[in-house]
Image: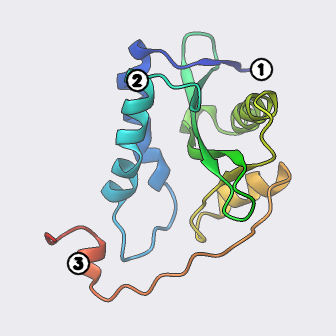
């Protein structure tokens, strides 16, 4: 069983190296792997360097001393009620650690964190094509609520290949 613990500053390089795993699925052709990997980089760095009680950054070690998973959650307000809730910004597990219950352990830990704060919900976003992640979330009781649609008018711009 993985040991779940708060992330520490000394984990930074390991955690940043895990961000490319977020693009380990058939990504839409209007996005790039680099975009996906970089999208949450600033949130992770900010959470590590400027701890905030409204954020939760967890790592899973399995075996002890080896980081196999990362979860970053922030506090957001529910669109409909305005109540605070936890939002999973980043959840990733290394290839070597997959299938060992690490994602489940991290999610259960953030659910406890959210419950202790009196939050009503834990939310997350997942790419429609990321079937592996979607199946994990559904097994753990998560269900789609809204669907975000996009129609890229300028694929190069959407991919971040042009300025402004």
Q: Is residue 47 left or right of residue 74?
A: left
Q: Is residue 138 left or right of residue 18?
A: right
Front label number (1 vs 3): 3
Q: Note whether 63 is above or below 153 in the view shown.
A: above
Total numbered labels: 3
Q: Which residue is mark 3?
A: 156
Q: Nearer the viewer, residue 40 or 25?
A: 40
Q: Determine the residue positioned at 70% across, 60% down.
A: 134
SS of the residue at dot 2?
Answer: loop
Measuring from the top left, give residue 110's x and y in whole percent.
Answer: 71, 33
Spatial separation of the CA atoms under disc 1 and disc 2: 30 Å
SS of the residue at dot 1?
Answer: loop
Q: Earlier in the sequence, mark 2 or mark 3?
A: 2
Mark carried by residue 66: none
Front label number (1 vs 2): 2
Q: Contact, CB < 8 Å: mark 1 with mark 3?
A: no
Q: Determine the residue positioned at 80% across, 57% down.
A: 138
Q: Note whether 67 is above or below 41 in the view shown.
A: above
Q: Nearer the viewer, residue 70 or 73?
A: 73
Q: Quadrant of residue 74?
A: top right
Graded by Cα atoms within 10 Å as few (under 14), some (14 to 19) or many (20 or more), the crowding at tag 3 reads few
Spatial separation of the CA atoms under disc 2 and disc 3: 34 Å
Graded by Cα atoms within 10 Å as few (under 14), some (14 to 19) or many (20 or more), the crowding at tag 2 reads few
Q: Nearer the viewer, residue 40 or 47?
A: 47
Measuring from the top left, give residue 91's x and y in whole percent.
Answer: 58, 42
Q: Which residue is mark 1?
A: 1
Q: Earlier in the sequence, mark 1 or mark 3?
A: 1
Say which quadrant the C terminus sits in: bottom left
Say which quadrant the N terminus sits in: top right
Spatial separation of the CA atoms under disc 1 and disc 3: 44 Å
Q: Which residue is mark 2?
A: 50
């Amino acid at each position: 069983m993985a040991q779940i613990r708060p992330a520490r500053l000394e984990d930074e390089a390991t955690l940043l190296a895990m961000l490319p795993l977020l693009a380990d699925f058939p990504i839409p052709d209007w996005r790039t792997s680099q975009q996906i990997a970089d999208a949450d980089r600033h949130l992770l760095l900010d959470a590590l360097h400027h701890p905030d009680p409204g954020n939760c950054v967890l790592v899973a070690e399995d075996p002890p001393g080896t980081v196999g998973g990362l979860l970053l959650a922030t506090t957001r307000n529910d669109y409909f009620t305005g109540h605070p809730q936890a939002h999973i910004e980043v959840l990733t597990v290394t290839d070597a650690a997959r299938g060992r219950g690490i994602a489940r352990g991290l999610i259960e830990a953030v659910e406890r964190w959210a419950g202790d704060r009196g939050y009503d919900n834990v939310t997350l976003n997942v790419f429609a094509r990321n079937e592996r992640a979607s199946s994990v979330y559904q097994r753990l009781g998560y269900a789609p609520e809204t669907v975000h649609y996009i129609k890229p008018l300028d694929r190069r711009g959407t991919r971040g290949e042009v300025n402004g």
